[in-house]
Amino acid sequence: MLFNITRAREYMRRCDIDVLVATSPVNITYFSDYRCWIDPLFKAYMMVPGAPSDPDPTAAYAIFPLAGEPALVTSPTFAVNASDLWVQDVHIFGGHGLDDSLPLGDLSATERRIYDILHRPQQNATPTDALLSVLTARRLTDARIGIEMEGLSPRTKDTIEAGLPKAQIKDCSNLIRLIRMVKTQDELLWLIRSAEINETAAMDALALARPGQPIAEVVQHYRQQIGKKGADFDHFAFGVRGLGLATEPHYILTDNDILYVDFGCIYEGYFSDSGTTLAMCEPSATLIDRHKALQECVAAGVEAMTPGAKASAAQAAMWETLNAHGITASSPHGHGLGLEVRDYPIIVADNGRRICDDCVDSPSDLPLEVGMVLNLEAMISMPGLGSLHIEKSFLVTPKGARTLISHDRTRPVQPD
């Protein structure tokens, strides 16, 4: 189970919320384990020409009440994706679209459950109708309801408010982000596996790099290796002559390249993100010293990542370390990892802003908690000379931060 139920209930009690409703594909996955590839991509106009480009996910809502059974609203077309979820109360909208003119074929018990859901009598023409039906059946129409408003179009918000005139409706978009910060055991397993696949594939790909070779071939090898392990591609970025970062791989490696590289994949919906330095030649003594400064920078950040410490403390330790080496043109920082490539907390200097919605109001400089998975990264770009980079993932434990997996960043990667 991905969903941190204990943490969600604690926040719900603290914020006086009776039920949470997730509306975006990423949070529907978090609440229910339901995933469908098209949900983050689909927009209204793709089925209704002339309609706006509002998000129009086919899995529309996940509902988690403080007391009672959770529920999922999904389209009949993709309801079979809900066959193995921990959430059992599944609802559809519209017609099931199945051809029932022939005798029913053989179905397993799990398949028969989906068949029965699809044929269950219901009057819901839209996903929002189904949401209102679920809340009505649970006697929650006059409840305190937290809804992820960021995933809704204005017209859908209006429909929900009109359908729940007695409810206290509150935006809980940021509340959900705060719940997601601390990972469950299942999440941690997926994050570790994603990081392992990412690291192995990247090191295999970088080992093949040669002067005169298009970096596209390195990237393609990385893609192939993560694919063999069941992961999807997220990114592979690289530095170009110390001038900045590129993701379009139309670059030919030279025999004096020193390149920033940053790579990540997605496994079971969970992101990995890591980075190192690729050296196509022996780095100069000056660059080796600067690379050691990056190592010390990341180590200082790790030492500062203790439970209860503010996120900014790690960034400050990293920045002070680089400054001590006379390096000021860099932006060492960090971030959480999870179902998105960057989860809260974001490890940057305190910006004085607040993370707030109708349910929570917290300083953006969040305290670190046991169970967070965090990245730290630092880079230096030197025009015409190259770019250096170190990025690693860590787990916050009661005794401080430890590496999520083993990554060797003691020296730049130098292919044989």
Image: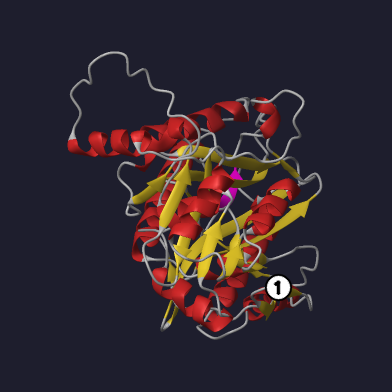
Q: How is the image coloured?
A: secondary structure
Residue 125 in the image, given as x and y percentages of width and height: 55, 37
Q: Is residue 3 something that shows in the picture?
A: yes
Residue 301 in the image, given as x and y percentages of width and height: 59, 75
- Give whichever of 408, 140 is nearer the camera: 140
| Crowdedness near tag 1: few (<14), some (14–19) or many (≥20) residues, C-alpha within 10 Å | some
Q: Residue at x 48, y 40 (%)?
A: 123
* Badge 1 amino acid: Cys
Seen in the image, is 177 located left or right of residue 51?
Answer: left
Up/down of 9 relative to 331, above or below = below
In the displayed orientation, state which residue is furthest to the top. Answer: 102
Q: Residue at x 59, y 67 (%)?
A: 146
Quadrant housing the N terminus: bottom left
- Give whichever of 73, 172 is nearer the camera: 73
Question: What span is in magenta?
Answer: 274-279
Q: Residue at x 62, y 71 (%)?
A: 297
Find disc 1 in the rendering and name its residue.
356
- Give whichever of 14, 231 is nearer the camera: 14
Residue 236 in the image, given as x and y percentages of width and height: 59, 40
Up/down of 248 relative to 244, above or below = above
Q: Is residue 294 something that shows in the picture?
A: no
